[in-house]
Amino acid sequence: MTEPIPYLLNEPRFMPPQNWDWSYKTIRGMKIRYGLPRSPKIYKAVMVIFGGLGDYGEQYFEFVHECETQDIKVIIIDLPGQGGSGRYLPHAPHKRHSAGFTELLEDLHVLVDEIALSAAIDADDNHKRLPLILFGHSLGGHIALRYLKEYNKASRGYNIFSAAIFSAPLFGIKAVEMTPPWLRNIVFTIMRFKPTAYVPGGCDWYDGFRERPGFKGIFTSDPVRNALQSAYFLNPTTQHLAIGSPTNKWLLDAVKSCRHVNKSGYLDELSMPLLVGLASEDQLVDNAATRKLLANLPQADLFEIKGAQHELLLEADIFRQIFVDRIFTFIRENVLNRPDAGKTHIL
């Protein structure tokens, strides 16, 4: 079992940035939590973060602090069903369920259109909007790609995001891809009869969840950052963030969505610059699927971090710093170095 480091949540890097504020938007009866700094500070760009499966916004605070040093305002959106957002199965809050990825994208679009665009108004010139960058980790990377392809238009018709960064994106699930097709079809058929049941081997969260058989040592090699989840989920004031395994319905929806993005021609019209970080030791997502999907996008910069595990922003510094440095270089070269520093006139 993991012993949370007592002082972990009081470490400055893991604490909320100055003037940080959590707010909620209710859509279809689901409360979606989002956070951002309410500060008069002058920013150069805005980054919206979609986290991975089971993520909670607080785990990105270390990265938010680093973005602040680069004058990048971060908006974290907790995906519905996890983090500080509402649950699809309120009677079973540890079950990471799904109402379908199409509904999820529709709800996120409402939030982005209403919140992110307002937060990006240039404090120096309210007739201009700061450039917006979309960041997605794992499941969040999958959702981000679909968002860019299907929903990247504001209600007034112009593009919202001008660049995107993916961290270990999920375009193929390794355990699924390794299962023989004949067996996979049988298992999926059985799953459809029990949509709200945990996936095989799934369970509620408990202290030691990340070290259970089959999952020990596959998230990050950094013991301090690895302990962050237990520290938050066991803390009385933040234990509502706890989430366990996904349900059968979530897995079936994820597989369906992976097939959707892998359809021939799906990404033909996607032209914005993409930075895609892959972990060479990833045991959760299928890197081969990512390489295949993005192979025909010349503007997609794929790079693999040798020795890194799945959670790149929670990895040991020897791996993590490579990714963070690459992120800020990418933003400088592809966003801030554009004419007018990437800003656009508000229509």
Image (spheres, rainbow, N blue to C red):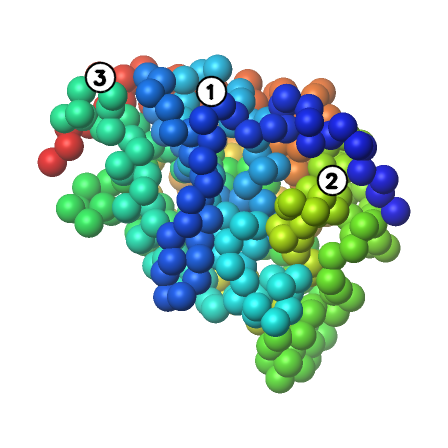
Give the mark nearer the N terminus: 2 vs 1. Answer: 1
Secondary structure at badge 2 equals helix
Nearer the observer, disc 2 or disc 1?
2
Q: State which quarter of the image contains the C terminus.
A: top left
Q: CA distance from mark 3 to mark 2?
A: 40 Å
* Kind of residue at disc 1: Glu
Q: CA distance from mark 1 to mark 3?
A: 18 Å
Instruction: Tell whether 177 sits left or right of 290.
Output: right
Nearest to the observer: residue 65 or residue 334: 65
Q: Is residue 136 above or below residue 247?
A: above
- At a point 46% along the width and 48% down the height, the residue shown is 33
Instruction: Tell whether 128 sits left or right of 28.
Output: left
- At a point 47% along the width and 20% down the height, the residue shown is 68
Give the mark nearer the N terminus: 1 vs 3. Answer: 1
Q: Which residue is mark 1?
A: 68
Q: Is residue 139 above or below residue 42?
A: below
* Figure quadrant of residue 287: top right
Secondary structure at badge 1 equals helix
Numbered marks: total: 3
- At a point 27% along the width and 17% down the height, the residue shown is 341
Residue 336 position within the rendered picture, expressed as x and y whole percent measured from the top left? 33, 18
Q: Residues within 10 Å of mark 1 (few under 14, many from 20)?
A: some
Q: Residues within 10 Å of mark 3 (few under 14, many from 20)?
A: few
* Kind of residue at disc 3: Asp
Q: Residues within 10 Å of mark 2 (few under 14, many from 20)?
A: many
Residue 77 position within the rendered picture, expressed as x and y whole percent measured from the top left? 46, 44
One can see residue 314 in this view: yes
Q: Which residue is mark 2?
A: 231
Residue 199 position within the rendered picture, expressed as x and y whole percent measured from the top left? 69, 68
Q: Which residue is mark 3?
A: 124
* Kind of residue at disc 2: Ala
Instruction: Tell whether 45 sits left or right of 344.
Output: right
